[in-house]
């Protein structure tokens, strides 16, 4: 299975968008699945169901960090490189999907119990988010490949 299929399968298995994208790629960088799930767990639903940055986006950005983030505060070159990659990813995701925000992408404010119930009750919402997971993984893969 490729990374897109893995991420979509995890999303179908009740993992959040951030968990699905991040855990599909984390083993490539030596991070075990349990640790990856813990790291990504708070980013789903636009950061803890706040409807902010889409979890598929934050999952991808965390992967970019694994691929080329800095490990020393004086490593300005790595900092600039990772920021450039994040901006490249964000611009492509935005152009393809129209927003980076969960609330805008779904059209639902999931920070309320009513909004969350609305999101979960309609299978079309699952498909929309599943498509966003796939989009994030595809764009991420293209950027990682170079």
Image: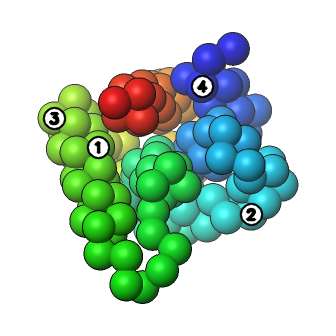
Res. 71 visible in picture: yes
- Location of the C terminus by quadrant is top left
User: What is the CA distance from the residue labelled 1 to the residue labelled 2?
Assistant: 23 Å
* Dot 4 or dot 1, earlier in sequence: 4
Q: Residue at x 67, y 25 (%)?
A: 6
Mark seen at residue 89: 1
- The residue furthest top is 1
Q: Residues within 10 Å of mark 1 (few under 14, many from 20)?
A: many
- Secondary structure under the numbered disc 4 in the rendered image: helix
Q: In the rendered structure, are the residues bearing label 2 and label 4 in contact, judged by CB atoms less than 8 Å apart?
A: no
Q: In the rendered structure, are the residues bearing label 4 and label 3 in contact, judged by CB atoms less than 8 Å apart?
A: no
* Dot 4 or dot 3, earlier in sequence: 4
Q: Residue at x 72, y 42 (%)?
A: 27
Q: Residue at x 36, y 42 (%)?
A: 106
Compare residues 132 and 69 and report the one nearer the observer: 69
- Secondary structure under the numbered disc 2 in the rendered image: helix
Is 54 rendered above or below residue 49? above
Q: Is residue 105 left or right of residue 22?
A: left
Mark seen at residue 95: 3
Compare residues 85 and 24 and report the one nearer the observer: 85
Q: Quadrant of residue 66?
A: bottom right
Q: Is residue 143 left or right of residue 84?
A: right
Q: Position of residue 55 (x, y in %)?
A: 48, 52
- Location of the N terminus by quadrant is top right
- Secondary structure under the numbered disc 3 in the rendered image: helix
Residue that carries the numbered disc 4 in the rendered image: 3
* Dot 1 or dot 2, earlier in sequence: 2
User: What is the CA distance from the residue labelled 1 to the residue labelled 3?
Assistant: 10 Å
* Dot 2 or dot 4, earlier in sequence: 4
* Dot 1 or dot 3, earlier in sequence: 1
């Amino acid at each position: 299975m490729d990374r897109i299929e893995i991420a979509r399968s995890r999303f179908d298995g009740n993992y959040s968008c951030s968990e699905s994208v991040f855990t599909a790629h984390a083993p490539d960088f030596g991070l075990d699945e349990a640790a990856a799930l813990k790291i990504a767990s708070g980013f789903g639903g636009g950061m803890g169901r706040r409807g902010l940055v889409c979890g598929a986006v934050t999952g991808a950005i965390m992967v970019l960090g694994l691929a080329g983030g800095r490990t020393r505060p004086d490593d300005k070159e790595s900092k600039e490189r990772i920021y450039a990659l994040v901006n490249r990813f964000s611009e492509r995701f935005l152009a393809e999907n129209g927003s980076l925000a969960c609330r805008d992408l779904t059209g639902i404010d999931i920070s309320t119990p009513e909004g969350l119930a609305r999101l979960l009750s309609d299978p079309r919402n699952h498909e929309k988010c599943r498509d966003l997971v796939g989009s994030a993984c595809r764009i991420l893969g293209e950027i990682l490949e170079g």
